[in-house]
Amino acid sequence: MGFSEFHGNEETVSRLRNLLAQGRLPHSVILSGPQGSGKYTLATMIAQALNCETRPLTDGLPDFCGQCGSCARIGEAADLDTRVAESLEARDAMKESEKKETRLFVQTHPDVLVIAPDPPQMMIKVDQVRRVVGSIYFRPLEARERVFIFTDGAFMKEAANSLLKALEEPPECATIFILAKNAGELLPTIRSRCMVFSLHSLSTETMERYLLDHCRQWKESERALVSRLSHGAVGRARSFDLPAYCAARHDALILLKTAFLAEFHTELFKVTETYRAGSEGREKMELLLRCLYSLLEDLLFLNAGAGQLLRNTDIRKELEKLAEEVDFDWLSAAALAIGEVERGMRRNLLRSLSLDGLEAALENHEKVLSP
Ligand SMILES: [Zn+2]
């Protein structure tokens, strides 16, 4: 364990570790970078390095052991999606009156608090910031340094304003991280009080090399596919559920083809039948929609003569054939129709029903195109 487990962005990581070594790590830090570039992973690693009980050095720079009580407890927060889901479930189980008072936090160590956007607005709310401000000026309970990680830079206005003073004059033993896809989207009042460090995604080639070392069970064509689908994010690539993706993509292809070829109708019916309500159905449906988007994007690349950008490289031939049958108008209509299904899902319509609706929308458009 340690910073060697973090892949890519070596320069930024070493800059941060150098600042740690000199005891000059800023107390208000923005980590900016696209989804999957490792912002959250890096923030939790720094929290571990700040608080590791054994404080190892590698290459002469501060590292963390990953094993001591402090590292282990902070490490439990690493799987952010699961921790957030648990926290939301716990809140859902509360009484209505308590729900309103309860904000979303992830805390696996008494001195490390993770603040995630609170649904339904998916923004950081003022009550969340109040909890940060309310504890930041106290000495850490166990650790050397209190760490606060805002996993998103979308603050409600009052929340942002409440945070400004803490960002400007943070106490000696606290560090605030704000993670943002794009530092430029943060309020200038927040940005100007923090030091910004940028992360970028790994290139497809770097990712393929990484997978060759770490996921040997995958075939070359599978590694190529996962590298392209995980948008440069190592974590996402390693945990990529290839069988589920391929199954969903199979269904997505049938849906797209059905719009052209009548004999696919029976097939389609079979597909929509399997997408029923319930949380499992919802997950399946979301994956199906992601696959549909990714196929449409690939068809768009092929139509635009940019086949080198193709992601679903393992089914290139099939996609090339399909691309000959569709034009830009059809593709944009299809994208709009899928957007409709997504909105429908949010309104909690019966899932199979909205899939049938999508199919109807695609076919109608086809009729308009070919009189
Ligand atoms: Zn440790």
Image (spheres, rainbow, N blue to C red):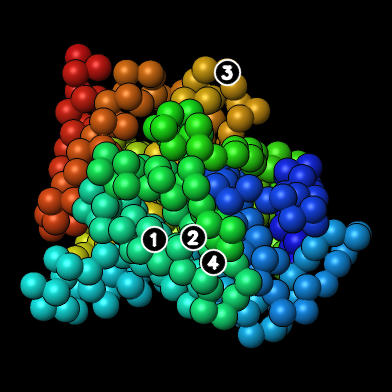
* Among numbered discs 4 and 3, the one appearing first in the sequence: 4
- Label 3 neighbour load within 10 Å: few <14, some 14-19, many 20+: few
Q: Quote the CA–CA distance across marks 1 and 2.
A: 7 Å
Q: Amino acid at mark 3?
A: Gly
**Residue that mark 3 sits on:** 305
Task: Kindly tell me whether mark 1's CB lies below 8 Å from ligand 1.
Answer: no
Looking at the image, residue 151 lies above or below residue 82:
above
At label 4, the amino acid type is Arg
Q: Quadrant of the N terminus?
A: bottom right
Do callouts 4 and 2 mark residues in contact (Cβ within 8 Å)? Answer: yes
Residue 359 appears in the figure: no
User: Marks 4 and 2, Cα distance to the nearest angstrom?
Assistant: 7 Å
Q: Residue furthest top?
A: 371
Mark number, residue 277: none
Residue picked out by circle 4: 146
Which one is in front, 176 or 354?
A: 176
Q: Residues within 10 Å of mark 1 (few under 14, many from 20)?
A: many
The disc, 2 or 3, on the residue closer to the chain's N-terminal end is: 2
Question: Disc 1 vs disc 4: Cβ atoms closer than 8 Å?
Answer: no
Is disc 3 placed on a helix, strand or loop?
A: loop
Q: Are marks 3 and 1 in contact (CB under 8 Å)?
A: no
The amino acid type of the residue labelled 2 equals Phe
Which sits in the foreground, 22 or 317?
22
Disc 3 and disc 1: Cα gap in Å?
A: 51 Å
Q: Disc 1 versus disc 4: distance between alpha carbons?
A: 10 Å
What is the secondary structure assignment of the residue under circle 1? helix
| Residue topped by disc 1 | 132
Tags 1 and 2 touching, CB below 8 Å = yes
Q: Which residue is mark 2?
A: 148
Indicate which disc, 1 or 4, sits on the residue closer to the N terminus: 1
